[in-house]
Image (spheres, rainbow, N blue to C red):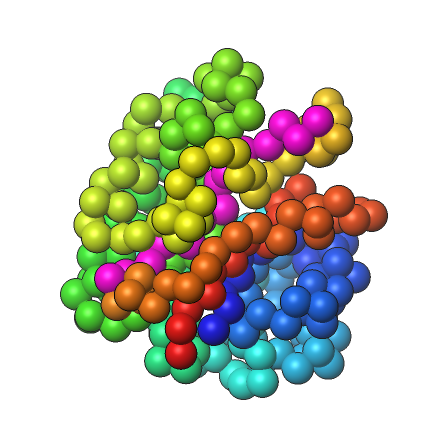
Amino acid sequence: MKIATYNVNGINARLPRLLEYLTEETPDVVCLQELKAFEDKIPVKAIEGTGYGAVWHGQKSFNGVAILAKGCEPEEYGRGLPGDPADEQSRYIEAKVDGVIVASIYLPNGNPQPGPKFDYKLGWMARLRARAAELLASELPVVLAGDFNVIPTDADVFSRAAMAHDALMQPESRAAFRELLFQGWTDAIRTRHPVGPIWTFWDYQAGCWQRDAGFRIDHLLLSPVAADRLLDANVDKAHRGREKASDHAPTWVRLAD
């Protein structure tokens, strides 16, 4: 079972690249982020034409998450991150596919920091830890997949100095991510690639793609039951180099049946 996470940076703008990815790589499950469209503007029929069912949680012009499943309709398991009824941003959705609970996550960026956006990021991460603990307690195979907007360590960025003041790698952001991992989640990418650079994002500016000046912010975290099934994990980096591609590359884990 191949489960991918893919921040498309606008589903309508990147639709040709997304359809290519689905037909060429044929992942079993794809978690999408940053749709930048409400449900009535999402190209559902085009995606269904590739053989995927989906659950959507869109938002006009911003955010938006989805879970696609090859050859079936994912069973929605939860919509919106619990803990703040006033939060209207579409950043979280859960579904069950073939017995595996999958969450598609678009964690807040948090810039500029310090300030209210950074406070929102840290508060959102606290709510995510609370929901993650509930999912762990279910003892089901669970995959938390998405754009976490956290660079976990200095080994996950091309230049510590270049990102030193960014919300993605502030001590508070990293500590919150570690607290999540310490609940018992396995970082699939670093388990399979424990050393060396393995990026998932390259900015459009300053020739970052051409210089391979990227960093790792797209993560797949596995519950213990899912981690026992881990076969492989990697980044489909070549898709970032295509014309009018997203600034993120699809990132994936493969679990034994």
Give the residues drawn in magenta, as a range.
211-224
| Depicted 24 relative to depicted 181: above or below | below
Horizontally, residue 68 falls left or right of residue 86, namely: right
x, y (%) of residue 241?
75, 44
Residue 66 lies within the magenta run = no
Point 56% across, 59% down: residue: 32
Q: Residue furthest left?
A: 137
Outermost residue, top side: 161
**Is residue 94 visible to us here?**
no
Image coordinates of residue 227 in percent, x first then y, are 31, 62
Instruction: Decide which of 62, 105 is in the foreground and name it.
Output: 105
Above or below residue 142? Residue 105 is: above
> Which of the 4 image quarters holds residue 199?
top right
Q: Residue at the location (53% across, 20% down)?
A: 159
Q: Residue furthest bottom?
A: 72
Q: Quadrant of the C terminus?
A: bottom left
Depicted 47 relative to depicted 193: above or below: below
Task: Compare residues 35 and 101 and report the one nearer the observer.
Answer: 101
- Residue 219 sits inside the magenta stretch: yes
Q: In the image, 206: left or right of 251?
A: right
Drawn side of residue 233 relative to residue 247, left or right: left
Q: Residue at x 56, y 43 (%)?
A: 200
Q: Which is nearer the eye, 121 or 183?
A: 183
Q: Position of residue 245 (x, y in %)?
A: 74, 48
Q: Residue at x 82, y 48 (%)?
A: 243
Q: Is residue 99 visible?
A: yes
In the figure, residue 20 lies in which quadrant?
A: bottom right
